[in-house]
Image: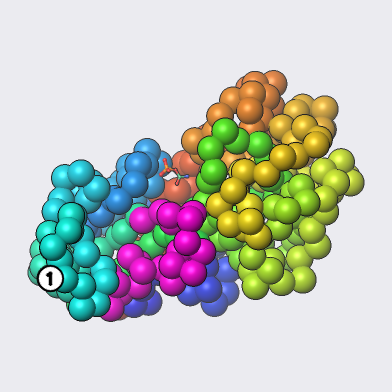
């Protein structure tokens, strides 16, 4: 595999899940595969899980990870072609990506959307510029429209915790105080569409995700109806896609409660705002698998890095 920038890079998700489970059983089996290879992790935005689990994955493969907080610590990067750089940006992506490629064998990038300019966000300018101007493979650590390391993690976790051949999985929107990206929701939808699950989405009117991603996945605007017989409730907030990047008025209370989810397993990518997105009683119950889910971030990242290293 050359790059890992989208869930669409996964041809057979079941075989990926099985390989990730094997890695989890024996994480140091390939500890020499990445020897003398460097992984550069470039963060334009904050992170706890992605930052640490991807480094841990690299270390398990014998790689040397190096990390940079690009926003704040690096020179401001210009992405526009032909721009007269007489403003705040001091370095063009053409030089930045080429230079970092000399220090790293793989570059991983996190760059969130603006949520103000849909067209620009959907162009994935930062991620695609790295793909264009770097001479080494690129891994998406959450871009404007996707979080494929998270989506793969979620698929692994559902496979691990499923007690049925075809479980019912619900992706439910929940409230939040800030306008959030669609990336986690998008990648989760794409991952579930590749799995043998009964998958539905629940969100208020006005919050439907990009129809090019949801395709024919059923969308309920009634949370109770969607949650009926659910085995997994995966919760995430996102801002409106239609009224791009906005927080809309919602009549009903969409916070996840113990009563609402019953015996379903509760999942969330984290970080999560307690008693806004989900009540304490859910997160503190045995039905919550968010910690186990976060653990799988390492094995998802390790699988992706392994597949890239095998083709270097
Ligand atoms: N789920 C996730 O990506 O967490 P971080 O933002 O902390 O990396």
- Colour pattern of the rendering: rainbow
Q: Position of residue 164 (x, y in %)?
A: 78, 53
**Residue 132 within the segment the image draws in magenta:** yes
> Measuring 52% from the left and 51% from the top, which residue is drawn there?
181
* Residue underneath mark 1: 95
Q: Position of residue 83 (x, y in %)?
A: 21, 72
Name the quadrant where ligand 1 sits.
Answer: top left
> Measuring 77% from the left and 27% from the top, which residue is drawn there?
258
State the residue in front, 312 or 88. Answer: 88
Q: Position of residue 148 (x, y in %)?
A: 48, 61
> Measuring 59% from the left and 48% from the top, which residue is drawn there?
246
Q: Is residue 39 left or right of residue 29?
A: left
Q: Is residue 262 above or below residue 215?
A: above
The part of the chain drawn in magenta is 111-134
> Looking at the figure, which quarter contains the C terminus?
bottom left
Q: Position of residue 256 (x, y in %)?
A: 72, 33
Residue 261 makes an appearance in the image: no
Q: Is residue 43 above or below residue 15?
A: above
Image quarter of residue 52: top left
Ligand 1 neighbours mark 1 (CB distance < 8 Å): no
State the residue in front, 229 or 242. Answer: 242
Q: Is residue 10 left or right of residue 62?
A: right
Q: Is residue 199 left or right of residue 136?
A: right
Image quarter of residue 42: bottom left
> Measuring 58% from the left and 57% from the top, which residue is drawn there?
244
**Residue 114 within the segment the image draws in magenta:** yes
């Amino acid at each position: 595999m050359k790059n890992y920038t989208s869930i669409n890079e996964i041809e057979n998700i079941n075989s990926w899940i099985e390989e990730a489970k094997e890695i989890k059983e024996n994480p140091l089996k390939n500890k020499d595969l990445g020897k003398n290879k460097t992984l550069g992790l470039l963060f334009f935005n904050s992170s706890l899980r992605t930052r640490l689990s991807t480094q841990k994955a690299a270390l398990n493969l014998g790689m040397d990870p190096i990390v940079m907080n690009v926003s704040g610590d690096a020179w401001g990067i210009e992405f526009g072609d032909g721009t007269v750089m007489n403003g705040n940006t001091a370095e063009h992506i053409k030089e930045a990506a080429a230079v970092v490629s000399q220090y790293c064998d793989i570059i991983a990038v996190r760059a969130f959307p603006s949520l103000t300019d849909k067209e620009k966000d959907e162009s994935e300018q930062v991620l695609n510029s790295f793909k264009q101007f770097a001479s080494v493979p690129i891994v998406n650590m959450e871009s404007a429209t996707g979080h494929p390391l998270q989506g793969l993690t979620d698929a692994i976790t559902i496979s691990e915790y499923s007690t049925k051949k075809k479980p019912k999985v619900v992706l439910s929107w929940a409230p939040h105080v800030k306008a959030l990206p669609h990336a986690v929701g998008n990648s989760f939808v794409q991952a579930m569409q590749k799995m043998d699950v009964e998958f539905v989405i629940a969100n208020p009117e006005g919050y439907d995700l990009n129809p090019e991603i949801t395709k024919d996945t059923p969308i309920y605007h009634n949370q109770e109806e969607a949650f009926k017989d659910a085995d997994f409730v995966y919760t995430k907030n996102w801002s409106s896609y239609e009224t791009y990047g906005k927080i809309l008025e919602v009549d009903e209370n969409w916070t996840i409660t113990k009563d609402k989810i019953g015996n379903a397993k509760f999942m969330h990518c984290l970080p999560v705002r307690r008693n806004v997105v989900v009540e304490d009683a859910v997160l503190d119950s045995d039905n919550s698998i968010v910690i186990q889910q976060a653990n799988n971030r390492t094995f998802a990242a390790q699988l992706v890095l392994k597949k890239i290293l095998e083709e270097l």
